[in-house]
Amino acid sequence: ENNHGWERFGENHGDTALAGYIEGPWLTKYNNMYYMHDSPLGPYRYAPNNPISHKPGGFMNGAGHGSTVIGPNNTYWHFASMPVSINVNRERRICMFPTYFDRDGLMYTNTSFGDYPHYAPVIAGKMGEFTGWMLISYKRSVKASSYYDKYKPENIVDENVKTFWVAEKNDDKQWIEIDLLNLATVYAVQINYHDYKSNIYGKVQQLYHRYFIEGS
């Protein structure tokens, strides 16, 4: 922990009371090498590019737990369990990032612009690549039909998974509006639902949310 700050416990790696702990994923095999090692008995040495998956900023962030799988066309993808920790302390969201191996055989994950749209793994020639579409709603002007307590409308444009908007009532009369201020081409809209005090843990059949989105 003294040499590798990312192993220190806590959201910002600042907890000095609790010892850090690393929860290992299943092993990934590539070119006859098992990541973590080519021999289960060692000897082990610390990899120079640890951790292989780290996203320090943006909407979702963290090193998190996770495992790497082989996707379409033999591409590798890392599924990281990244923290939210609002409803319960261990609350997570699953994020997926393209994963590669360099000439020295070191495995690494590309988390750059990981919150933004990327091409699907099945798109030939562009598998997992960044589309180049940028966030245009950040810190823009927001109006809403109502809000409850500290969960204000401007929370939806701060790019922080831990803050969110809650309407005063739970009915179909509630609305929220973002003014982009300038003319822009919108290629994609992402709605991040937060289950505020739902007390629902797991999937419930026939329960879903529907949104009506307008543009002008």
Image (cartoon, rainbow, N blue to C red):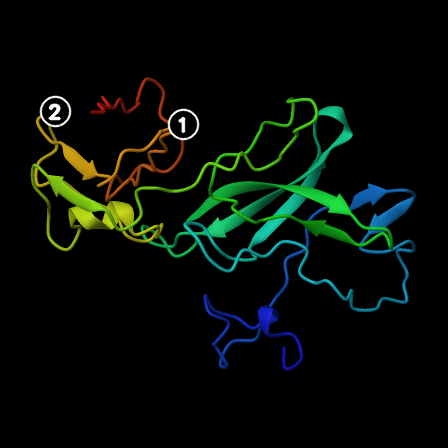
Q: Is residue 197 left or right of residue 192?
A: left
Nearest to the observer: residue 188 or residue 171: 188
Mark 2 neighbour class, 10 Å CA radius: few under 14, some 14 to 19, many 20 or more: few
Residue sitting at 40 percent across and 52 percent down?
A: 84
Nearest to the observer: residue 213 or residue 132: 132
Residue sitting at 49 percent across and 34 percent down?
A: 117
Q: Distance between the residues labelled 1 and 2?
A: 26 Å
Q: Tell me which corner region of the image, top left, top right, bottom left or bottom right, holds residue 173.
A: top left
Q: Quadrant of the N terminus?
A: bottom right
Q: Can you identify the residue that label 2 sits on?
A: 172
Q: Is mark 2 on a helix, strand or loop?
A: loop
Nearest to the observer: residue 209 or residue 104: 104
Nearest to the observer: residue 63 or residue 195: 63
Residue sitting at 28 percent across and 25 percent down?
A: 209
The furthest residue to the front: 183
Three-letter amino acid code of the residue under disc 2: Asp
Q: Quadrant of the C terminus?
A: top left
